[in-house]
Image (spheres, helix red, strand yellow):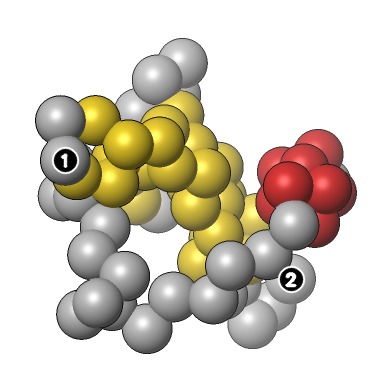
């Protein structure tokens, strides 16, 4: 499962934090402070809610996942 914290930037929705929770329960986190590692990287593509199957979650839920 992927979680994104995103902000609008010049008409696009840009991910500033990204968390991946794997089926095995591992958490991989990416942000400006940690752009990439051997498991993945912070997306460099804008998010498009009209094309991508995104579900908005409360900021508290994102922070709970991020803090794991």
Q: Determine which of the numbered discs, if any, sits on residue 11 in the image.
A: 1
Residue 3: quarter of image: bottom right
Could you tell me if the residues under marks 2 and 1 are in contact, i.e. CB atoms within 8 Å? no
Q: How far from the left and from the top, in percent, is residue 59? A: 73, 47
Residue drawn at 68 percent across, 64 percent down: 57
Q: Which is more N-terminal, label 1 or label 2? A: 1
Q: Determine which of the numbered discs, if any, sits on residue 25 in the image.
A: 2
Q: How crowded is mark 1: few (under 14 residues within 10 Å), some or many (20 or more)?
A: few
Q: Say whether residue 64 is left or right of residue 56.
A: right
Question: Farthest residue toward the front?
Answer: 11
Q: How far apart are marks 2 and 1 (CA)?
A: 34 Å
Q: How far from the left and from the top, in percent, is residue 46? A: 20, 50
Q: Nearer the viewer, mark 2 or mark 1?
A: 1
Residue drawn at 26 percent across, 57 percent down: 47
Q: Is mark 1 on a helix, strand or loop?
A: loop
Q: How far from the left and from the top, in percent, is residue 41? A: 32, 43
Q: Residues within 10 Å of mark 2 (few under 14, many from 20)?
A: few
Q: How far from the left and from the top, in percent, is residue 43? A: 26, 47
Whether residue 50 appears in this view of the structure is yes
Q: Is mark 2 on a helix, strand or loop?
A: loop
Q: Say whether residue 57 is left or right of residue 51.
A: right
Quarter holding the N terminus is bottom right
């Amino acid at each position: 499962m992927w979680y994104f914290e995103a902000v609008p930037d010049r008409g696009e929705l840009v991910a500033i934090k990204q968390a991946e929770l794997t089926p095995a329960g591992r958490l991989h986190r990416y942000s400006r402070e940690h752009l990439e590692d051997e498991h993945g990287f912070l997306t460099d593509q804008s998010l498009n809610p009209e094309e991508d199957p995104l579900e908005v979650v409360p900021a508290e839920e994102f922070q709970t996942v991020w803090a794991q």
